[in-house]
Image (cartoon, grey):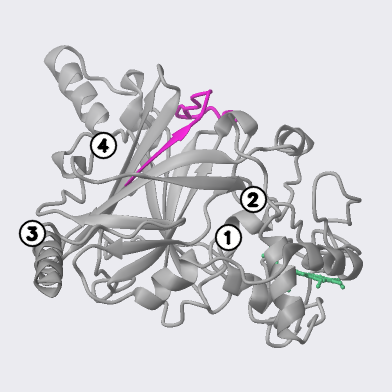
Amino acid sequence: MKNIIKSFIIAGLATAAYAKSPAPATAENLINAQRVSNINVANISPTDSIWRNAKSVAVIFYPQTTIKLNDAKANAANKDNKAIAAQVSAVYNNSAIAFKISWSDPTQSVQSGNASDVYPDGFAMQLPVSFNDPKKLPYIGMGSEGRPVLVHLTKATNMHYEPNGNGDVEHQVNPHNTNAFGADLANYKDKVNKLGKQGYSRAFISEGFRSMTQLKDGSDKFGMKMTYDAKSKRWTGVVAKQLRDGAADLSKFGALPVSFAVWDGSKYNRGGVKNLSTWLAVKLQGKAGGDALVKELTSKPKGDAKAGQAQVEAMCASCHTLSATKQAASPVMAPNLKNIGGYSTNAYLVESIKDPNAVVVPGYNRNAHKGFAWYNVDAKTVKRTSTMPPMMSDDKSINDAVAYLKTLKAEVAK
Ligand code: HEC
């Protein structure tokens, strides 16, 4: 009798589990992409009905502190940057994937046509061009040599004009430059209006800062949009792309790594000075595969952070700045690590300690920055080699160091 009841209960549970689809797993850095029927890639919008069932998760964007700009005003404005709490949701179908991100920004900065002193707010999405090994993802700051990423970037801009084939913008946009009047002038103005572009969206392949190559051949089909809500002081950005295009084929995976970055124009953010997420795992609901990637990106560090701290402070602080309060090492010696735990994966940190040459962090140009000591460049092959010696050979020390490095991150802005 007891057994019969038991099997009834189990059967009941099993039916319930089948009736609903299995509840998506939740974990830090995990986004469940909901399957939808139609994604309008070119004209993706935050108000599309596709977002109705997409559940957003909290993701944190950490200040990137790897390099400093050659701009005292910008460096002062970004000195004590906090992390930004964002919300991310995703949807996909057989041919496309789309993300919606929203983040707080108390100041809306929009770039107008030719005002070069105003930096715009913006956001970007980054995907690896390929990712066979979830432990060897591209460097989070726009890829690195041999590990390229695909970057989609948009900025908040007012109507702006780009040169036509003749470089003849002046004539296109200035009605005084035409002899037309009356209906002809109205037609002319209409034409000028249509030539203007509202947004700035670009696709790049990048192997590190300063190696971005814009994709202009149209092989990469994507759409982006960002809208500001003055009441909540938040941006909402949407980005959609074909899973398969001339740059990458992401259609065969059950899970994808993705990362997002945001720029705050009021703090003169640009280039490498921004807030960014770590690699996030996007699980395509109902599609098989990708378990190793999800496991890797949602795993907690194994070591003992306290033991790691003692070792890292003794062995690494002569080259690396570890926190805002500890004694600072010279930025020309090595990258600042005060936010490294926020935007780096465990596997990346292990690799950085064991094998510094696996990813040589892209930095300043040695010719323009005297004394810059991050890497040597072979005159013949132009290949960069890290000046960091491999540190720590035993797994326990490395795991402890990684557990400590994961604690190095700015607090979240309220
Ligand atoms: C002799 C100076 C030196 C020492 C000592 C040193 N490093 Fe480095 N480290 C560097 C340089 C230079 C780079 C940048 C080039 C590269 O990517 O290897 C770097 C890069 C890194 C990175 C990648 C940073 C990023 O922004 O992605 C990590 C993580 C790191 N080191 C951790 C450590 C740890 C942990 C220790 C101590 C166990 C240590 N380093 C000791 C010089 C040093």
Mark 1 and mark 3: span between their CA atoms?
Answer: 43 Å
In terms of secondary structure, where does tag 4 sit?
loop
First in sequence: mark 1 or mark 4? 4
First in sequence: mark 1 or mark 2? 2
Q: Label 3 belongs to which residue?
A: 19
The part of the chain drawn in magenta is: 100-118
Ligand 1, seen in the image, is in the quarter at bottom right
Q: Amino acid at mark 2?
A: Gln
**Above or below for 252 versus 321:** below
Q: Is residue 74 visible?
A: yes
Q: Label 1 belongs to which residue?
A: 141
Residue at coordinates 48% horizontally, 67% vertically from top-left? 297
Quarter of the rendering occupied by the N terminus: bottom left
How would you classify the magenta stretch by its main secondary structure? loop
Task: Classify 10 Å Cα crowding around label 1: few (below 14), some (14-19), many (20 and above).
Answer: many
Mark 3 and mark 2: span between their CA atoms?
Answer: 45 Å
Image side of residue 333 versus residue 258, left or right: right
Give yes or no for residue 111 being in the magenta stretch: yes
Query: Mark 1 and 2 residues: CB-CB less than 8 Å, in contact?
Result: yes
Image side of residue 56 versus residue 20, left or right: right
Q: Label 2 belongs to which residue?
A: 64
Mark 3 and mark 4: span between their CA atoms?
Answer: 31 Å
Task: Classify 10 Å Cα crowding around label 3: few (below 14), some (14-19), many (20 and above).
Answer: few
Mark 1 and mark 4: span between their CA atoms?
Answer: 26 Å
Task: Classify 10 Å Cα crowding around label 2: few (below 14), some (14-19), many (20 and above).
Answer: many
